[in-house]
Image: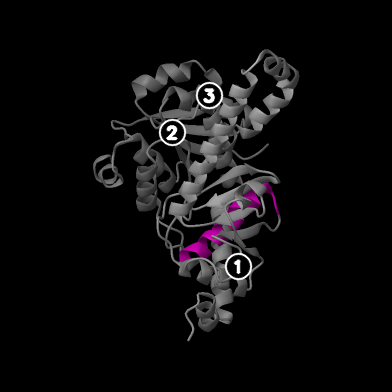
Amino acid sequence: MPEQVCISLDAMGGDHAPEMVVAGAEIALKRLPHLKFLMFGDEARLKPLLAKYPGLEAVSEIRHASQEVTMDDKPSVALRQRRDSSMRLAINAVKEGDAQGVISAGNTGALMAMAKFVLKTVRGIDRPAIATYMPTQRGETVMLDLGANIECDENNLVQFALMGEVFARILFGIEKPSVGLLNVGIEELKGNESVKKAAAILREIDLPIRFEGFVEGDDLAKGTVDVIVTDGFTGNVALKTAEGTARLLVHFLRETFKSSFWAKIGYLLARRSLQRFRERMDPRRYNGAMLLGLNGIAVKSHGGTDALGFSNAIGVCHDLIANRLNETIKAELTAFEQATSKAPINEEVVAIAAGQSD
C-alpha cells in the first residue's frame, strides 16, 4: 500500500469555498485512499460539511483560522495583516512539517508572496515560477512562468527551464522532456537580449536536457516541445489567450448546432464524439498550477473551479510529493552548478548570441 500523504488545504480559498474544497477532497480520496488532509478555515462552517462525508472526516483534521485572504487583498497587505488566515496557516503547516504540500484556490499574488516568505526559495533559484500543463495536438505541454515574474533575465529563464524539465518528467513520466524558449521566431537572431542569452546558455551547458531552441506562439497548440519557457508577462497573456480561444470555439460550436433543424440532427448524431471533445478541452482536467522553486510543494487551484477541478489539483499535489519533485530539482541544480564550475559559460558566446559583440 502506498505511503500516506498529508496535504494541507486552504479551505476558505476560492469562489465556491469551503463547499467546493471539501467536496473536492472527497473525490480525491476515492481516487487516492492513502491521502490525509489538514483543513484550515472557519471550523463552524467546515464541521457540518465534513460530517456529510464520514470517510473523509476520518482522515481529516480541521484547524480553525480566524481570518481569510480575499481576492481583493494586495499581496503586501495579506502578508502583513493575514497571519491567522486559512491560507497562511495552511502554508505554515508545510514549513512546520505537519503536511507535505499545500493547495489553495485563493488570491494568487497573496499565495505566491506568503509561500515565498514562509517556505523560502530553493538554493540556486532566484525567483519561483508558476507552471501548469495544457492540452496540445500531441498530448500535453508544460508552460512556465505564468505570471509570477513579469520581467526575467537569462538566468531566471535557465532556472525555469531546469525546473520545468523536472516538472514534466514527473507529471508525464517522460525520461527526457524536450524544452523550448517562447520567442517571436525560431531564428537565432530574433528575440530580446534575455531570451537570446538564455538560449546560448542552454545550448552550452553539459546537462541531460533536450533543448530544442526557440518556439513560437502556435507551437503551444502543436505540442512541438514538452516544456515551454517564458517570462511571466508573456506566459500569462499566452495562457489567457488560449483559454479565451477555447471558450470561443465552444461558443461557435453551440451556435452552429442550434442554427437549423438539420444542424440539431447533426448534433444528435455526433453527440458522443462531441462529448469526448468537451472532456478533452475541460479546463478542470488541467487544474493545478505548481509554484516551482520553493522549499515545499505549493499548488494553486483556479479560483472559479468546482469540486472535480479541485480534486485534480489535489492529484497534481500528490504526484509531485510522491515523486519527490523538490529533491529532483535540487539535484538538477547541483548538477548545473557543477557543470558550469567545470566548464564555465563562455560569456563571449552568450554575448554573440545576444548580438552584443563588437
> Measured along the vertical axis of the image, is residue 319 above or below residue 162?
above
Find numbered disc 2 in the image and state the secondary structure of the residue it sits on: loop
Closer to viewer: mark 1 or mark 3:
1
C-alpha span from label 2 to label 3: 22 Å
**Which residue is the site of mark 1?**
187
Find numbered disc 1 in the image and state the secondary structure of the residue it sits on: loop
First in sequence: mark 2 vs mark 3: 3
Corner quadrant of residue 26: top right
C-alpha span from label 1 to label 3: 54 Å
First in sequence: mark 1 vs mark 3: 3
Q: Is residue 34 left or right of residue 149?
A: right
Image x and y of residue 113, in percent: 35, 49
> Measured along the vertical axis of the image, is residue 132 above or below residue 229?
above
Which residue ends up furthest to the bottom in the rendered image? 358
Type of secondary structure dominating the magenta stretch: helix
Disc 2 marks a residue whose amino acid type is Gly
The residues colored magenta run: 155-174
> Measured along the vertical axis of the image, is residue 234 above or below residue 34?
below
Q: Nearer the viewer, residue 129 or 41?
A: 129
Image x and y of residue 168, in percent: 62, 51
C-alpha span from label 1 to label 2: 38 Å
Residue at 65% x, 29% y is: 279
Image x and y of residue 136, in percent: 65, 44
Residue at 40% x, 55% y is: 150
Corner quadrant of residue 14: top left
Image x and y of residue 21, in percent: 47, 27
First in sequence: mark 1 vs mark 2: 1
Disc 3 marks a residue whose amino acid type is Leu
- Please say whether residue 114 is one of the residues in the magenta stretch: no
- Please say whether residue 157 is one of the residues in the magenta stretch: yes
**Which residue is the site of mark 2?**
303
